Amino acid sequence: MDILYLLVPLSVVLVLLIGALFWWSLSSGQFDDVEEAGRRILEDDD
């Protein structure tokens, strides 16, 4: 039972950290054009 006093706050901090990283990636434009890299591979560079 004592381990819950450690694991519950640790899991809350981990969820908040993952949420903050996801929010940062959305606001910095990481997911704006996810298909461009695939098209760039297929295009010919003449």
Image (spheres, rainbow, N blue to C red):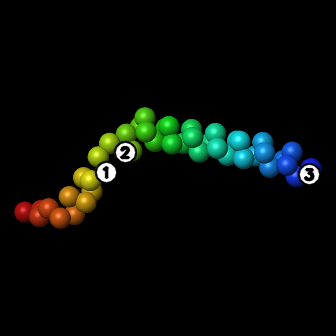
Asked whether the residues under the numbered discs 2 and 1 touch, taking CB atoms below 8 Å apart as contact, a structural biologist would say yes
C-alpha distance separating marks 1 and 3: 45 Å
Which kind of residue does numbered mark 3 sit on?
Answer: Met
- Could you tell me residue 2's position as x and y percent? 92, 50
Which kind of residue does numbered mark 1 sit on?
Answer: Val
Camera-near label (1 vs 3) is 3
Q: Quadrant of residue 15?
A: top right
Q: Quadrant of residue 8?
A: top right
Q: What residue is shown with label 1?
A: 34
Q: Mark 2 or mark 3, which is nearer the start of the sequence?
A: 3
Which class describes the residues within 10 Å of circle 2: few (<14), some (14-19), or many (20+)?
Answer: few
Q: What residue is shown with label 3?
A: 1
**Mark identifier at residue 25:** none
Q: Quadrant of the C terminus?
A: bottom left
- Could you tell me residue 18's position as x and y percent? 59, 45
Camera-near label (3 vs 2) is 3
Asked if residue 43 lies left or right of residue 17, the reply is: left
Q: What residue is shown with label 2?
A: 31
Q: Residue at x 29, y 46 (%)?
A: 33
Q: Residue at x 26, y 53 (%)?
A: 35
What kind of element bears circle 2?
loop
C-alpha distance separating marks 3 and 2: 42 Å
